[in-house]
């Protein structure tokens, strides 16, 4: 009897968990947002910018920029019943995207997003290149495909804490033609130095990463936010003072704009017993607005340094 009661509680808990996953975005669609660039722009927020980029006024915007990564990072759902553990057995279930499905959705996003990113960069006198366009030599190919972000002590600590706090399954997958370079996870001096070394190896003036954060459950996948980061040479020369030089990096983050402030997310993929359905229309409008806002913000900061 005790075991049956435990199973009953587990079933009740299961339905309560399944019924409650984030369903925000059922009314909105990607196109609801993508067709309103001003609305998207208001939801774009920027991480603190280093004061050094004002010095770009003497250099100007980078001309030849490489889009080195375009990927999806998905956080799934984790369900657990303490009651089931008490009254008979343990119940838990985790649901989330795989690296393969993250690649599939990321590739669909890239097909829409990359062309509009190129348009916005070109409108400001810059050329945005994808790996197939900037990888010209064997050395460059090796440098790109062998590249990985260094894990400093702080990053390792953050990951260990996250494993305890967040038991949800996670998957990261790059779009076709791109490597996964998850710069959204952490940023420190070692990473900035490694990115600058990669930039020099590729012969580029700056690097860009486009991150799509998603959330998935057994019913659907939601787009939670889109972030665009740009990295380029530090416009401030390395100081001669030893203490100051210790904290100087050859690369700085020019821009880090994220669409998602106050944004509840929208469903772009549904699952059911018979088939699945995708709704990508409008994603390109979101990326266009994010890119335009990020580049305009960068230009404003540069203008202040003149």
Image (cartoon, rainbow, N blue to C red):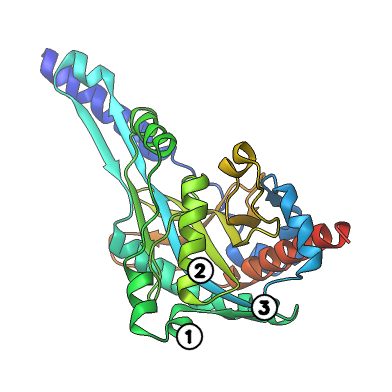
Q: Is residue 241 left or right of residue 111?
A: right
Give the mark, 1 or 3, whose residue is nearer the N terminus. 3
Q: Position of residue 152 (x, y in %)?
A: 40, 41
Is the Cβ of the residue at disc 2 closer than 8 Å to that at disc 3? no
Judge left or right: residue 75 versus residue 122. left
Circle 2 SS class: helix
Give the residue at mark 3: 63
Residue under the point 52% across and 53% down: 192
Q: Residue at x 45, y 72 (%)?
A: 201
Q: Residue at x 70, y 48 (%)?
A: 50
Q: Is residue 180 above or below residue 190?
A: below
Question: Does residue 109 appear in the picture of this structure?
Answer: no
Point out the frontmost of discs 2 and 1.
2
For marks 2 and 3, the one nearer the N-term is 3
Earlier along the polypeptide chain: callout 2 or callout 1?
1
Q: Quadrant of residue 124?
A: bottom right
Image quadrant occupied by the C terminus: bottom right
The quarter of the picture where the N terminus appears is top left
**Image location of residue 299, percent across then percent down:** 79, 65
Question: Label 1, label 3: how many angstroms apart (C-alpha)?
Answer: 15 Å
Question: Does residue 260 appear anywhere in the picture?
Answer: yes
Is 195 situated left or right of 97 in this image?
right
Residue drawn where x is 62% and y is 55% of the image: 253
Q: CA distance from mark 2 to mark 3?
A: 13 Å
Q: CA distance from mark 2 to mark 1?
A: 14 Å
Residue hosting label 2: 199
Residue 289 image position (x, y, % from top left): 70, 66
List the residue tagged with mark 1. 133
Given this view, does label 1 or label 3 mark the residue nearer the observer?
A: 3
How crowded is the residue under tag 2: few (<14 C-alpha within 10 Å), some, or many (20+)?
many
Instruction: Provide the secondary structure element on which disc 1 rests.
Output: helix
The residue closer to the viewer here, 269 or 227, is: 227
């Amino acid at each position: 009897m005790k075991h049956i009661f435990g199973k009953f509680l587990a079933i009740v808990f299961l339905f309560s968990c399944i019924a409650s996953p984030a369903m925000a975005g059922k009314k909105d669609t990607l196109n609801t947002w993508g067709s309103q660039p001003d609305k998207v722009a208001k939801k774009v927020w920027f991480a603190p910018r280093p004061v050094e980029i004002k010095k770009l006024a003497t250099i100007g915007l980078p001309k030849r920029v490489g889009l080195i990564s375009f990927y999806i990072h998905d956080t799934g759902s984790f369900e657990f019943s303490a009651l089931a553990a008490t009254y008979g057995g343990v119940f838990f279930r985790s649901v989330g995207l795989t690296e393969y499905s993250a690649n599939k959705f990321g590739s669909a996003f890239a097909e829409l997003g990359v062309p509009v990113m190129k348009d916005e960069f070109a409108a400001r006198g810059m050329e945005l290149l994808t790996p197939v366009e900037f990888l010209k030599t064997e050395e460059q190919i090796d440098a790109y495909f062998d590249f990985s972000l260094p894990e400093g002590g702080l990053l390792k600590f953050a990951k260990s804490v996250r494993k305890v706090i967040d038991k949800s399954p996670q998957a990261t997958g790059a779009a076709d033609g791109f490597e996964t370079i998850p710069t959204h996870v952490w940023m420190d001096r070692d990473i900035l130095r490694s990115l600058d070394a990669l930039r020099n190896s590729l012969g580029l003036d700056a690097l860009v990463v486009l991150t799509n954060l998603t959330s998935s459950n057994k019913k659907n996948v939601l787009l939670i936010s889109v972030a665009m980061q740009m990295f380029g040479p530090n416009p401030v020369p390395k100081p001669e003072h030893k203490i100051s030089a210790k904290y100087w990096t050859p690369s700085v983050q020019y821009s880090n704009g994220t669409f998602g402030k106050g944004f509840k997310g929208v469903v772009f993929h549904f699952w059911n017993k018979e088939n699945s359905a995708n709704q990508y229309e409008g994603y390109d409008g979101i990326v266009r607005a994010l890119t335009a806002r990020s580049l305009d913000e960068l230009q404003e900061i540069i203008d202040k340094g003149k």
